[in-house]
Amino acid sequence: MFLQLRRECNRYAPDSFFIRAMMSRPTFTCLILMAMVLTYVQSHWSMMEGMWRAQIDLLPVFAAFAALHGGLGPIIGLALIAGSWLDVLSANPLGTSLVSLFLTALILHRLHEVLLKGQLAAQFFVCLAAGAFGPTISCLFLWGMSMQPLAGWGTLWQIVVNAMICGVAGPFIFLILNQMDRLVSYEPVAQPWNRSVVEVKRSKRY
Amino acid sequence: MTAGIVLLSLPTRVNNQLKWMVAGVFLPFLGLAEAVDEKAESLQSIVVSKQELLRENQQLRREVQNYKIALLKNQTIATENALLRQQLGWRESLPWRLLPARVLVKDPTNWWRSLYINLGSDDGIVENSPVLSPSGLVGKIEQVESHRSLVRLVGDQHCKVAAMLAISPRQDKDESAHGTITPGADTSLNPRLVDFHHLPVGTEPEPGAKVITSGLGGGYPRGIPVGHIIDSRSSTSGLFAEARVRLAVDLNRLEMVWVKLPDQDVSATEEGM
């Protein structure tokens, strides 16, 4: 795992994580803030729990966005900040959400070249998978560490509901974050090797 | 990833201390969120009509009068109780010291039943203090930070309660079945349903029978309502009887709770005097 991380770091080494990873710092800040606000809202209002008998965790959607639109930097940043925030608001031991978010995002990042991140259907299925995978990993970790999480057949229902809601909410969150990205980021400057924007002036001799 | 695994493999106490430190980093966000909540509540109060407030005021006045009458009756019983205790040579029961607390956040995960309240060690809160609501038992304090505390709710794996069937006035014997309240198979979907384990063989509690804390083990004082029986069965081993209990408190709708502070040591106070 260490070697893999080092290889990833070396791949991004020439520039900062954020430049090469196609996610600007303001977009990353927006992503983190939105994830934190939504996590707080979901812990404060239990409307969804009353309706669906399941607490909704939308953080895997943000992990999916970071994985598809960014590199290792945003993934680690999101896992560290949003994961710790979720653990601080819950009875989770510190580090539980960090591991699950990082794993979810890392797997999606490995596949990001073959995923059609602009397509609604692809966004739906990616967020659906992330919404199911994230809580399952957290629960399995806690179980493995003998921390006695409350798990039963009901947990299966809660994971399915969480996955469905993440799937539905995913495209909306992607849309909002993409709009924010357009608002807060500079237009990419044409690179000198991009010949399509170079105006060639010819003299009379030619 | 490695950091996460290292953090998870740390001893619980060390992990809790680290969590406390990380919570300190997030303190401005927590304060901001609380301020926004309070502002939203005050905005809500502007919208409420005067007529509605007057109606509510009248209703509350009526309730206060009812409680005053009930208090008079209880005071007479308490005096009688103290006198009888004195005659029997029993120690006088101390009045509960309760502290009101506001619920800050509910656990955003599905595998814990817990919440955070706005009182901490600065307010005199200590670990394992019982947490109550007017309807009954809510849970116990598990972690205490300076300005907030983690409450494990009844129905969580880490909050087991020694309970007993309340003695009904029709009951001949002064005995009741004791057991333990633990999360059941349905608790993950319905947090109000818990299991009542380790009841003596042959106990068949009637549906609707009240369950109260037994006071055994010293965690919770005796007599706090926990819930009522839904149905009962024999355990798979056949050594005990089991029952399903519906909790008296709707844990999803809690906004305000009461923390019972530890009784002050009477002997220490006397020595000090």
Image: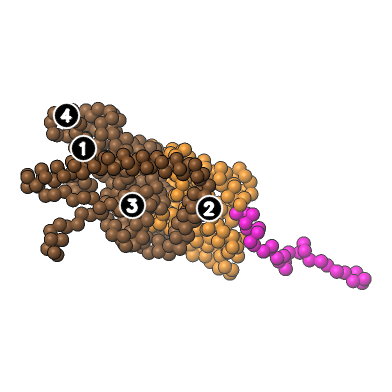
Chain colours: A orange, B brown
Instruction: Tell me the number on the disc at residue B171.
Output: 4
Q: Which residue is mark 1?
A: B164
Q: Nearer the viewer, mark 4 or mark 2?
A: 4
- Residue under circle 2? A62
Q: Are marks 2 and 3 on the same chain?
A: no
Closer to the camera: disc 3 or disc 4?
3
In the rendered image of this protein, does residue B230 appear above or below residue B62? above
* Residue beneath the point at 41% across and 51% down: B105
Q: Is residue A200 magenta?
A: yes
Residue B100, disc = 3
Q: Chain of mark 2?
A: A
Q: Residue furthest left?
A: B88
Q: Residue at x 59, y 60 (%)?
A: A27
Quarter occupied by the C terminus of chain B: bottom left
What is the crowding at mark 3: few (fewer than 14 residues within 10 Å), some, or many (at least 20)?
A: some
Q: Are marks 3 and 4 on the same chain?
A: yes
Q: Could you say which is closer to the camera, residue B143 or residue B16?
A: B143
The segment highlighted magenta reads A177-206
The mark that comes first in sequence, 1 or 4, is 1
Cα distance in 3D space between marks 2 and 1: 47 Å
Disc 4 to disc 2, how far (Cα)? 59 Å
Identify the element where label 4 is drawn.
Answer: loop
Q: How crowded is the residue under tag 4: few (<14 C-alpha within 10 Å), some, or many (20+)?
A: few
